[in-house]
Amino acid sequence: MITKIKELFLGENLEKYGTERRIINALIRNRVRAADYISVLEEKDNIFLTKEGFGFAFYLTLPAFLGQRQEEAFETFLNHDYPDGTVINFMAFSSSNIKPFLDYWEQEHSAENVDIDNPGILKYIIKKRKEYLLNAVNNSFWEDVEAKPRIIYNIMSVHIPFESDNPDVVRIQFRRIRKLANRIREAIRAEGFGCDFANADMMLAIYKEILNPELQGAIKYQKGLDFNRQVLDRNTTLRLVGGLESDLEVANDEKKKYWRGFWFSQYPNEMTLWKFSNILFPYDDTNPSPIIPTDFFMCMQVKVEDIEKRQTKITAKAIQMQDQAEKSEFARWIPKIKRRGEYAKYIKEVIEDGKVPYSASMYLFISADNPEHLDDIASGAVQRFVSKKFKLAREIDASLFNVLMECLPLNQIKEREEFFINYSTLFDANIASLMPFQGTSLGSKRPITLYLDRKYSLWGFDPFHSDTNFNIVKIAASGGGKSFSENDFHVLNLSAGRKIRVIDIGWSYKPLCSLLGGEYIELDDERNPCFNPFTHIIEDEKGNIHEDELAVLIPFVGLLAGLDLNPEALISNEDNLMARYCSFIARAITNAYKSYGNKTGLKEVVEELQKLEDDTGDNIPQKLSQALYEFSHGHYARYFNGENNIHYSKDYVVLELEQIENKDPRLKQAILYSLILRIFREFFLAHLRKDYSRKFLVVDEAWSILRESKAGYFLETAARRFRKYGCSLVVITQKIEDLLASPATRAIYANSAHLMILKPSEQDIEDAKSEKRLPVSDFEKELILSLTTVPGKFSELIIRNSVLGTVVGRLIVDRYSYWTFTTNDAERRVRTELLEELKNYELVLETLAKRMPIGEILEKLGYITGEQKQLILWLQSNHPKYKGKLFGEIATELGFVSKEKVIEATEKQKNISLQLKQLVEAYKKK
């Protein structure tokens, strides 16, 4: 029968594929191939044919945190109109097969012809980051704790048994199931979840990873060959080991792994999805090692039966139980009888309330590389559930293997299910609150910057994946890892072929810009900088000033005059004071440009203003001329007259404002906005030339200037128009109060799709919240306060936007990236000295990345403890007194170790690098 159905299903004669198969009843055979336990046979149009029916599966994208809204949604689509006999499987699968994701990530960072002096550094960093993450899959990120990168998939599968073996009935059923699958997908999407079909490639990858000892790489389903014959690799063997309390050993010639399974035999009386989803992975858990650091999957299997019959049957049984309890003479003395009666009463009330009963069963399967390791992990995970009033029973012997196979998506075999699956009666609301799905961020469509969530699920962020604009506001207190994470952001976006312009105060990006060979422009007086905004005016097709140019030049001139102007008042023909100011400035700029072209300066604009007459009696042109005099003819005239000499062309440019920090606040504002105008014009011109490459303007540490700014509209215009040009405005501040301190900063925040928060000070959060100025919810506040930095391991941040929701990311980098991005002055000196000696950046990074840190050497020698090492690392990152100092200096200063022992460790560090010395010599000879 099955062969004929397959031919009907595929519309082809299967004899040419050699896929004639007999149905094997695995339960009554002593020797069978593992593939015979797999029911899935073929796939067509996202519908799978199995030995006993049809099925489909969805790959769900869920919020990072699951709560009441998601619980209600799960209950809704659980109660969809499924045929009797349907088995629904809800599964969360932790996959260590991250290579396809990293291959895609590497591809997104393969931009050629990046215009910096040292583009090879970018490719080198990408290569080393990928190697580091792949290595961590097997060896963990760190020696002292187990933490491995993974991707967590949430899969919902629906298996529907054949109605008949009649070809006409099968054909009709297939069409009906295809329509049902599309309806359910749309219903899930209507609840706000991402939902796509899990195709044959994805399903095969899940099966292969679970039933083979290792999988790294993309999997392609071979059409025409039975699905179940493609799952096991040739040299893979499966066997039960360990006696009665057995584990499933999955092995090949090189590697082994072990699966252990648990059945949830009892559930607590009360549970919510929020509480349940926080059992294994608490939302505020900052521990470097998760409870389950290895692969696992958890599933809830639900059987759909005739609802009315089941309700009648359960109600009758409940009445009987309640009657027995009420009439029993022992009920008052035996708590078990009393509880049974109370439970029966509860069942009746729930059914009367319209809740739907199902047969359901939940399982947890955990893997590890050896049984002893599995003991440690499994005991910790089980204890978490036990502490919440669950009871778990270990699956043993043949039951383990058969239950594991039955829990795979669409792998339902009726005889196996009836014999091995332990069903309980759960109502739809119960099932929704016990959904095993894991809230994780799958990140943006294009993974540019890489993070891991607190479950260690890998995801990427791209600000250009947005429904609104592409702008970012970042809040990062001193010591919160801002400069380090921003360096990472710059390198990864440059690698993706994007251009970056940075306006900074404080030389934060000078080391990185120097290493990459970008352009670093310092605005000291020796340079004699000129910021004249009229030198490079963009014209329209008729040779007039382009309307987009006027839209930013008018508020710029207004800024110098101490006014906050909105030129849209001109477009709407408003007749008010602002409109008249805008009108006079526009006429003066236009007249000056007609006379002087790109030789126009602020002096010429003011002279044109003086020629204009105001018949209203307000004398606006003269007032403007007087307000602008200091910048047009006075002390600051040299900055805004003559040819603009701020030139740059590379893809990475840093404009340093430290030299103007002590100047007149009005001049600082004028210079800042002239630079923004210069960059704004560059981006606009690229747009006119149909250059659609992505670009960033990063404004860092400039909030002292922005706070008192009167150019709210000017900045708002930049933030708003950057989307049109395919660009992103990134503004960075240390405090939340800076974010909302002025109309300008509030305008930036209101027009920014992305909010990124690195660890802020607790006082800053409390102050902002008490003043009702914190733009986050109470839950987000708790999440922000839980952000942490573990020195030597990771720093955390929060990203919030309309696409991802609110997610926590851990920035974990390899040693090569660390030595590239380090903000420690002493480490930068070491890097600079070595670069001067070797003249090759890749070799410098190889040398620095592979040498053992002094702290680890001192710990291995027994001179300091692990706690002392962590304290010193924390002080290096967070304490002003110790920032920029070497590890050995701090250890000596704190009295942990003598100078002699630090010298000894330093010598050992040098001697350990024999291999590196040989590498250096080989390079020198070459």
Image (spheres, grey):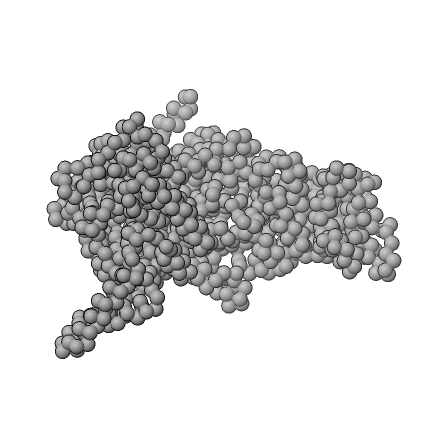
Q: Quadrant of the N terminus?
A: top left
Nearer-the-camera pick, 775 or 486: 775
* Location of residue 99 by image quarter: top left
Residue at 39% x, 48% y: name it. 180
Left or right of residue 733: residue 638: right
Nearer-the-camera pick, 365 or 685: 365
Residue at 44% x, 62% y: name it. 779
For residue 136, say whether it is visible.
no
Residue at 42% x, 41% y: name it. 818
> Eyeballing the image, is 741 above or below 891?
below
> Eyeballing the image, is 624 above or below 134?
below
Left or right of residue 252: residue 356: right
For residue 100, say whether it is visible.
yes
**Label tally:** 0
Q: Quadrant of the C terminus?
A: top left
Residue 296, percent across and down? 28, 47
> Eyeballing the image, is 605 above or below 282?
above
Residue at 48% x, 40% y: name it. 492
Left or right of residue 166: residue 761: right
Nearer-the-camera pick, 548 or 729: 548
Residue 270, percent across and down? 30, 66
